[in-house]
Amino acid sequence: MKISIITVCYNSSETIRDTIESVLSQSYKNIEYIVVDGASKDGTVDIISEYKDRISKVISEPDKGIYDAMNKGVVASTGDFVGILNSDDIFFENETIQNLVAHLKKHPYIEASYADLVFVEREHTAVVTRKYSSSGFSPWKVRFGFMVPHPTFYARRQLFEKLGSYKLGYRVSADFELMARFFTKGVKMVRYPAVMVKMREGGISTTGFWWRVHQNFEIIRACKENGIYTNALMIAMKIPFKLASYFRR
């Protein structure tokens, strides 16, 4: 089974090396690693070039944003399953993909999988600050803005061809919209009960009050576009769910 891992980056010189080495250190070897850079100006490309002989494909050119870059990676991929590892995230352990593949082979009928992640200190990735568990997720919670952790989401490549990729009309929630779309289309998903990814605190998806407000409006739009009833009050009710998910095992 070939696993395609896509890292998109722009001016990520402070963290991209950790991400690349996290992928290259995986014990599972049938990995297609694709790095999509948005024409960085800060030395990111130089760091990527150090590993060019061990990276399957490198795309470095201007893009229309993070979701455009993700789409480029998906189009370039040839694996059985495709996942995204952001340029400031790292895998939880060297056996992460090996264990994921074992899980996928155990459930050959599934079309997508998701797992847990932990948040870590930005400068000290060995220090866990909180856990984001997916164990309490159910599809009915999507209408409240609850979703599985995107960095742990791996889907069969054919699904992107059949159901579409990330929509560029979203600034921050195209990943939510894509996963909501997959759920409503009846994609067979099974949770992998383990931590897969370490996510640094302080990223664009974890900070900023007004960014959160904008994200919630996009979540409402994503639900409505996929025939899921919701409203602003229901989305606000997700806070207790999310707080519980940080600690649930």
Image (cartoon, helix red, strand yellow):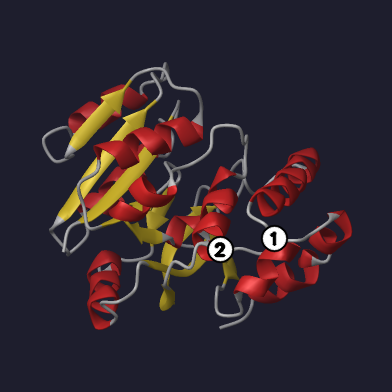
Q: Which residue is mark 1?
A: 228
From the viewer's perspective, is 66 left or right of 102?
Answer: right
Which residue is at a point 75% across and 64% down the rendered structure image? 144
Q: Is residue 120 visible?
A: no
Name the amino acid type tagged 1: Ile
Q: Is residue 51 above or below residue 123?
A: above
Q: Is residue 216 above or below residue 92?
A: above
Which residue is at a point 72% across and 64% down the rendered structure image? 143
Residue 29 quadrant:
bottom left
Q: Nearer the viewer, residue 17 or 85?
A: 85
Q: Secondary structure at mark 2?
A: helix
Q: Is residue 196 above or below residue 175?
A: below
Q: Is residue 211 visible?
A: yes
Q: Which residue is mark 2?
A: 184
Count the labels in the image. 2
Q: Nearer the viewer, residue 117 or 83?
A: 83
The answer to the question of whether label 1 and label 2 lie on touching residues, with beta carbons closer than 8 A, is: yes
Where does residue 74 sit, x and y in percent of width and height? 33, 42
From the viewer's perspective, is 90 left or right of 246?
Answer: left
Residue 47 circle label = none
Where does residue 65 sit, x and y in percent of width and height? 51, 28
Name the amino acid type tagged 2: Thr
| Circle 1 Cα neighbour tier, 10 Å, few/some/many (<14 / 14–19 / ≥20) | some
Q: Nearer the viewer, residue 81 or 99?
A: 81
Q: Secondary structure at mark 1?
A: loop
Which residue is at a point 77% across and 44% down the rendered structure image? 217
Q: Is residue 247 above or below residue 184?
A: below
Which tag, 1 or 2, sits closer to the chain's start?
2
Report the quarter where the C terminus lies.
Answer: bottom right
| Circle 2 Cα neighbour tier, 10 Å, few/some/many (<14 / 14–19 / ≥20) | some
